[in-house]
Amino acid sequence: MKSCLIVDDSKVIRMVAKKILQELSFETEEAADGQRALDLCKDHLPTAVLLDWNMPVMNGIEFLRALRALPGGNAPVVVFCTTENDIEHIQEAIEAGANEYIMKPFDSEILQAKFAQVGLITG
């Protein structure tokens, strides 16, 4: 089964994303910050990561760079999910290894469309 690690310091966002992803047949794991997410990834890499930008301990971009440096760390599809929508942030995320980018707030339709776009699900 495909798995998605939901990395966001908002419990509500994690809950909403988890519900949507489970409907899309993903196993989900959650982390409230980038460091916890990195520790989980060191144990086993998920198929996908839904990643927030602004978090305590380690932010999304720091996590992404650390993930991509791990053995096999290029495998997970990373979708940034954030309120940071200026071109500089988007460019930085893509350069750091993000596969896609969605804005908050998101809904089931947006998440499905992006996951289909990056090949995680069939449209």
Image: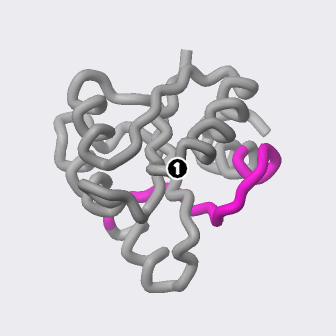
- Residue 15's quadrant in the figure? top right
- Seen from the viewer's position, the closer of residues 93 and 118 is 93
Residue located 50% across and 58% down the image = 80
Q: Amino acid at mark 1?
A: Ser
> Which type of secondary structure does the marked residue at label 1 adopt?
loop
**Chain part drawn in magenta:** 96-111
| Looking at the image, residue 71 lies above or below residue 95 | above
Does residue 108 appear to the left or right of 2 in the view shown? right
Which residue shows up at 62% across the image and 32% down it? Answer: 18
Where does the image place residue 79, in percent across and percent down from the top left? 52, 52
Q: Which residue is mark 1?
A: 10
Q: Position of residue 59 (x, y in %)?
A: 32, 60
71 relative to 106 in the view: left or right: left
Q: Residue at x 35, y 70 (%)?
A: 95
Q: Residue furthest top?
A: 1
Q: Quadrant of residue 105?
A: bottom right
Residue 102: in magenta span: yes
